[in-house]
Amino acid sequence: MKCPSCGAELDEKTGRFCSYCGAPLEAGPAVPEPPAQPPTEPVPPAMPDLPPAPDLPPVSTPLPAAPSGGGTGKGLTIAAVAAVVLLALFCFCCLFLRFVR
């Protein structure tokens, strides 16, 4: 066998490169790859086969009923303000009576 680059005489078992100039030699017959080994255990499917879902009508949730008073919540707001004022008055009285004694 001769090197295609420098023409040196080479042994058949030289390899893929010339031992004199280092040029790559012509590729010999391709070595066939061994066949892939089949898995030893069968792989279970990701999802089991399920029957198709039955056709059901859509479920609707009833909306909550509107308040029967029809007000805008003024009564609740007035009660909350009154409670805060009474609490502030109570705290003020407690502190005032503490200092007066």
Image (cartoon, grey):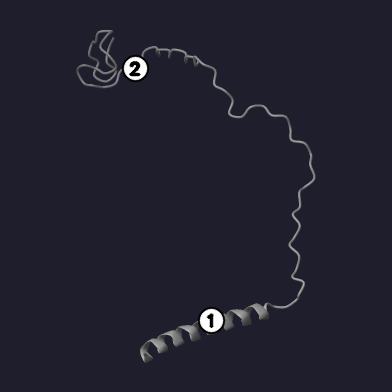
Residue 54 image-quadrant placement: top right
Q: Is residue 84 above or below residue 66?
A: below
Amino acid type indicated by mark 1: Val
Q: Quickly name the residue at label 2.
A: 26
Quadrant location of the C terminus in the rendered image: bottom left
Residue 90, position as x, y percentages in the image:
49, 84
Q: 28 left or right of 5?
A: right
Q: Quickly name the residue at label 1.
A: 84
Circles 2, 1 touching at the beta carbon (< 8 Å): no
Q: Secondary structure at mark 1?
A: helix
Q: Is residue 58 above or below residue 72?
A: above
Cα–Cα span, label 2 and label 1: 97 Å
Q: 9 left or right of 78?
A: left
Q: Secondary structure at mark 2?
A: loop
Residue 81, position as x, y percentages in the image:
58, 82
Amino acid type indicated by mark 2: Glu
